[in-house]
Image: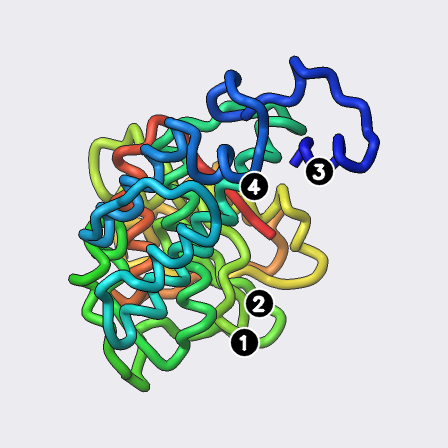
Amino acid sequence: MKGFLIKRGVKIHDSLNVCPWCNRELERADHVFFNCNFIAGFWKRIFNWWDIEWLAVSNFEEFYMLCFKAKIIGSCKSLWLTSIAASCWSIWLGRNEIIFDNKVLTMDTLIFHSKMRALLWVRAATEECRFQERLWWLCLYRCGLSNSGSAGWRSPQLGCLKFNVSGVMSDEEGIVRALFSGPSVACDTESAELEAIIIAMDVFNDIGWKASCSLIIEMGSRKVFNWILEKSKIDRRRACAGKLTFFFAEEGGNEMADALASTGMSRPCLFKAWW
């Protein structure tokens, strides 16, 4: 926060020391995270996502008391606290993008980033649990968290990245390394699936992973598989991607990919991220 820099003697003009969300109030931690009208609306939507009433707070102490006192029990409590932590982190990252990269973040984008980040954190922290990821975006109480040793997703072999059509790239440990989600101009599911494969290959090439790993693409359409053998666009990208393998996926084998496909329908533009 700029306020901390000012306390350390760094001179910052008052016109620059404003909240990045509203551009009116001075940038203070309590305002940026809770008291700004924009952020208050954000927290209201995050709490509504959990069917919990949002109550205005003044600082982090009151906020954490509100979160810990929420009437959520069992495994869902961990999901709730993870979601809250991911949302706080998303606010901070969003603030930095606005200030340092001159980005413009809408409420819907900030909500999407928070839910997606929370989903990735939950998947990494609760490997022994399964839940319906397609319901993650709607109501977390309906996700059906349960202990299960079986999972539809199968990890790739060492040194490979696996793409499940709909926008998720995972490594051999099941860790998501890249994802994308957005609208499609395709008029049928097969064309949309082919479009997703082309984007995945472009992302793989842009990141520069060709030299260090190979790419495995899972799909559920035999028709698309036949198209791949004929399309010149795919041939050009296959040459750039290096070692590339195609597989047929079990129906419903990757709910995270399904969730990205569902949310992508309501996004105004394509969202891509990798790390």
Sequence-earlier tag: 4 or 2: 4
Mark 2 residue type: Cys
Disc 4 secondary structure class:
helix
Pinpoint residue 165: horizontal percent, then vertical percent: 36, 53
Q: How far apart are marks 2 and 1 (CA)?
A: 6 Å
**Residue at x 39%, y 65% (from the top left corner):** 247
Instruction: Tell me the residue that label 4 is attached to.
Output: 93
Q: How far apart are marks 4 and 1 (CA)?
A: 33 Å
Q: Which of 127 and 88 is in front in this view?
A: 88
Residue 113 position by quadrant: top left
How many neighbours does mark 2 have within 10 angstroms: few (below 14), some (14-19), or many (20 or more)? many
Q: Nearer the viewer, residue 68 or 140?
A: 68
Q: Distance between the residues labelled 4 and 2?
A: 30 Å
Instruction: Tell me the residue that label 2 is attached to.
Output: 160
Q: Image quadrant for the N terminus?
A: top right
Disc 3 secondary structure class:
helix
Residue 134's place in the image compared with 112, above or below, is below
Instruction: Tell me the residue that label 3 is attached to.
Output: 4
Instruction: Tell me the residue that label 1 is attached to.
Output: 157
